[in-house]
Structure formats: C-alpha cells, structure tokens
Image: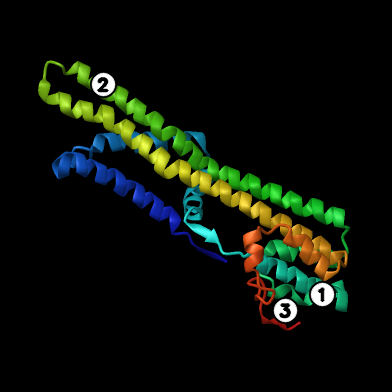
C-alpha cells in the first residue's frame, strides 16, 4: 500500500522558506522583490526543458509526471508483517501441501509474492525461482534508473543554464556600460540565473533523485526477503526456522517491536482464516 510522503513537500517548502526568510531578514520586502526576475526564470527553466527534450525520447519525457509523483509517495510495507505472512504460508504448506496455497493467491496483494508462490506451486526448482525473480529485480532497477535519470539530468542542467544566464547578463551589462540605467537589470540576470539554477538543483532535483534511489534500494531489499520466503515455503522449511532466517533481515529495534500476532497487510480474511 502506498501513502503520501509528507517529508518531500515539507523539505522543499522549508528550504524555500529559509531562503526567503534570510533575504527578508537582510534586506526587507523591497529588496526581496529584486530577487524575482522573469528573464532569469525563462533562461533556466526554458533551457533546462530544451535540454531534456534533446536528451530523452518522448516516451521517457511522458514518465516525468509519474517520476515526480513517486517522490511524494512511500510504501507502507512492514517487514514484520511480511515475515508473518511467510510463516503462515509455510505452516499451511507443511500441513496441507504446497498446492493448498494456490487457493489463497487471490488474497495476496503483492504481485511479486504472488508470482513467487505461483512458481513454487508449479514445482519450479528453487534455483530457477531464484534466477527468475532476481531477473525481475534487475529489470525493476533498470526501469527505476531510467526514470530517476530525468531528475538527475535536471540537477545537471539547471546550474549549467544558470551559468549560461550569468554569461548572457554579463554580455548585456558590458554592452550597456554607457547607460547606467541598464546595469541593474543586466546584473540581475547575471546573478539570479545562477541562483535559480543552483537552488533548483540542490533543493529540488538532486534530493528527489536521491530519494528515488533510496526507495529502489529499499524495494530490492524487500524483494530479496520475498525470494528467501518463497524458497523457504517451497522447500518445506520448518516455520520456526524460516522465521529465524527471515528475521535476520530485521534490525534489532524492529525485532523488539515485532508482535507475532500482527495481521498481515498483504492478505485478506481468506488467508487469515486458513
């Protein structure tokens, strides 16, 4: 189950508030207005978007919204509940046979778990199950990397276009030295484009890309637990042994909080009653 991750919008908002507060503290509201320059925004945003259109194909560009949305969501999956699920599956498989698990697949929400149990029920060798499910993990990592690369490129292009804007501003300023009234706007373009590009890169794009990378690593970690659980269920491991094996993936703090009676969020009432 996915939930809204409030830390991303809170972090971005807090960062901008701190920047604006520092400007207001130093110069007041009138000085703060001077930090707004439409020409600088056009250079940074327009140049960055143009670079993205050149760098990526249309299918990848269409993923931008989905990638951004992923930065504002989190997976509410709990490892103790996942381990408890496999303990129950193992108990039922030992009691009624591995084929009995096929009747409960409709109650399993996670498609990766469902696929693993399907392979186990079909009698696929553990080594083959391991290879198939690891291949899916590799494919998932590649998909996540391609999506994350859009944000990483934004983090590269924004400061670069900020520097280009600075050069444009300096050229305009040098060409208008005879007219002092143009020095201010030209200097604003020269400095604010670099400011905009650097802030976007370090407050928005780079942190969001890093967050998506952390989420991918967490997802891989969970899927590795699922693989171990599926193979343990198929091989008929003792539920207590399987519990100890999967429990090795938990931190000490999580183990101390784990309740053996927790209801699994991956299954419905049908499996709980089995």
Of labels 2 and 1, earlier in sequence is 1
Q: Nearer the viewer, residue 138 or 62?
A: 138
Of labels 2 and 3, earlier in sequence is 2
Image point 25% across, 30% down: which residue? 189
Say left or right for 242 vs 7. right
How packed mark 3 is, by other alpha carbons closer than 10 Å (few <14, some 14-19, many 20 or more), is: many
- Res. 46 in view: no
Q: Give x and y (percent) for residue 38.
A: 24, 38
Q: Nearer the viewer, residue 142 or 225?
A: 225
**Residues under labels 2 and 1: Cα distance?**
73 Å
Q: Name the residue under label 3.
A: 271
Q: Give x and y (percent) for residue 109.
A: 66, 69
Q: Give x and y (percent) for residue 89.
A: 78, 72
Instruction: Determine the image quadrant of residue 190.
Output: top left
Q: Mark 1 points at which residue?
A: 91
Image quarter of the C terminus = bottom right
Q: Mark 2 points at which residue?
A: 170
């Amino acid at each position: 189950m996915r939930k809204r991750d409030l830390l991303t919008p809170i972090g971005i908002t807090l960062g901008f508030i701190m920047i604006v507060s520092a400007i207001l503290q130093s110069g007041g509201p009138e000085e703060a207005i001077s930090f707004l320059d439409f020409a600088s925004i056009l250079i940074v945003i327009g140049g960055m978007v143009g670079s993205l259109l050149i760098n990526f194909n249309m299918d990848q560009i269409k993923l931008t919204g989905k990638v951004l949305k992923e930065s504002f969501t989190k997976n509410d999956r709990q490892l103790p509940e996942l381990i408890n699920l496999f303990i129950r599956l193992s108990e039922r498989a030992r009691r009624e046979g591995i084929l009995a698990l096929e009747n409960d697949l409709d109650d399993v929400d996670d498609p990766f778990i469902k696929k693993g149990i399907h392979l186990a029920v079909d009698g696929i060798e553990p080594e083959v199950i391991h290879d198939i499910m690891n291949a899916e993990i590799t494919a998932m990592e590649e998909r996540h990397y391609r999506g994350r690369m859009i944000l990483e490129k934004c983090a590269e292009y924004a400061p670069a276009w900020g520097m280009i804007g600075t050069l444009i501003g300096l050229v305009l300023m040098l060409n208008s030295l005879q007219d002092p009234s143009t020095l201010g706007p030209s200097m604003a373009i020269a400095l604010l484009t670099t400011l905009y590009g650097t802030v976007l890169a370090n407050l928005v794009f780079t942190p969001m890309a890093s967050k998506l990378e952390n989420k991918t690593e967490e997802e891989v970690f969970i899927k590795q637990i699922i693989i171990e659980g599926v193979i343990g269920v198929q091989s008929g491991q003792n539920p207590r042994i399987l519990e100890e094996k999967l429990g090795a993936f938990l931190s000490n703090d999580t183990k101390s909080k784990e309740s053996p009676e927790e209801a699994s969020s991956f299954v419905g009432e049908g499996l709980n009653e089995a």
